[in-house]
Amino acid sequence: MRLNRDRVIIIGGGIQGCAAAYFLARRGQDVTLIEKDHIARHASGVNAGGVRRLGRDLVEIPLSLASMDIWQSLESDIGVHADAFHPCFYVKVALDEAGQKLGLDRIDSLRKAGFQHECWLDDADIRKRLPHLSCRTRGGILVEGDGWAVPWRIVQGFAAAAARHGASLIEGCRVLNLEFDKECWQVTTSQGLFEAGQVVNCAGAWAADLARQAGEPVMPLSAHAPMLAVTERRRPILPAVMGVLGHTLSLKQLDTGQFVIGGGVRARADMQANRGEVAIPELAASMRLATTLFADIASAPIIRCWSGIEGYMPDNLPVIGRGSKPGLVHGFGFSAHGFQLGPGVGEALADLVMGQQPRISLEPFRPDRFEADT
């Protein structure tokens, strides 16, 4: 039995949990992070690695912009692991009239809301940026300074930085029960009983079950397996991360020349077996779209496909905020687009644990927003 009422226990070793552990430990808090598998095992480690402000829900943009501030000075936080972030430009092109309307309406909505980080380019400007494109476009939306990262390495960077500041990281430790008993949280695990004054629930697709154990209202969280594929090496033709308006595509070319294709396409998540499946027909649709953009990709054999397990909320917005029980904070439900948000969410979770006001409003993400529907 490991008793410590001053401890903060974080459940979940993805980017949200590891970033929260880092910001809390750096502020001198006694932090223990518990992960049932290993750090970055699920969605945070195997996602597309998109570091994008582009295309986010309007209510999510302030959090995304705050997080980007941290991404742009990442080396000061996680040291050498920051070299896994590759800033470039991020663009979503329109291939038809519907996509063009979607993009122009998007820009109009952003301007009315006071955001200037996304801009509209016509086809000529798109082709100057991407001279190897195989098709004409109807323009597109571009953001400078977004990019991509090797996701598992960024998560490992936050975990290592947290450990350097004194956090304890315990892997292979499954939470069996979570309950508030008198003055503190009792966390029963496969490695014994832990006691803490505060618990941060960053358990991803498993977070709703933990919330239920903690006595919270039912959370409408569902689990899916976002998929990706990687090709053999080809000549460098794509200096950006690319998508298509109206479609779920993430396409980038690594420094090795390999293309990574996917983003948003989902397969079934097998929660009992602890693994995500791969659905070839759905993934093939993304590959066909990629070959429409760049004919060179058609000759590049796929060498590997994979998926992770991610938790989705009905409105595709995360749950970030204090729970209904004392000392309980939630950070989950990132619906396959939480990677870029990770550093900002970690900082905000640390603020909540320490009773401080986060630098942006978390009202759109409050945990109780679905209570009337459940």
Image (tube, rainbow, N blue to C red):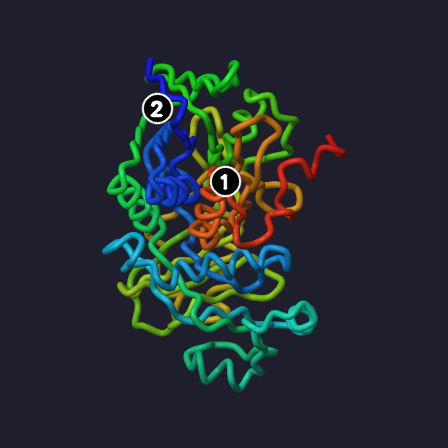
Residue 110 location, x and y as percent? 65, 69
Task: Using the image, determine if residue 125 lies above or below residue 178.
Answer: below
**Residue, disc 2:** 173
Task: Using the image, determine if residue 363 lies above or below residue 6.
Answer: below
Q: Is tag 1's residue or tag 2's residue first in the polypeptide sequence?
A: 2
Q: Which of 47 and 227 is in front in this view?
A: 47
**Residue, disc 1:** 310
Q: What element carries label 2?
A: loop
Q: Is mark 1 on a helix, strand or loop?
A: strand
Residue 84 location, x and y as percent? 30, 57
Q: Nearer the viewer, residue 182 or 267?
A: 182
Instruction: Give the quarter of the figure containing the C terminus.
Output: top right
Label number found at residue 209: none
Do the numbered discs 1 and 2 sit on residues whose CB atoms are within 8 Å? no
Residue shown at the point (48%, 42%) measured from the top left: 349
Residue shown at the point (75%, 34%) measured from the top left: 373
Residue 217 location, x and y as percent? 65, 26
Q: Nearer the viewer, residue 119 or 215?
A: 215
* Quadrant of residue 248 within the rendered picture: bottom right
* Residue furthest right as drawn: 372
Residue shown at the point (42%, 32%) measured from the top left: 10
> Left or right: 240 with respect to 105?
left
C-alpha gap between disc 1 and disc 2: 19 Å
Identified by mark 2, the residue type is Cys
Instruction: Give the quarter of the figure containing the N terminus.
Output: top left
Residue 73 location, x and y as percent? 35, 62
Task: Using the image, determine if residue 332 lies above or below residue 70.
Answer: above
Q: Nearer the viewer, mark 1 or mark 2?
A: 2
Residue shown at the point (59%, 48%) measured from the top left: 362
* Quadrant of residue 119 within the rendered picture: bottom right
Identified by mark 1, the residue type is Glu
Task: Using the image, determine if residue 265 lies above or below residue 93.
Answer: above
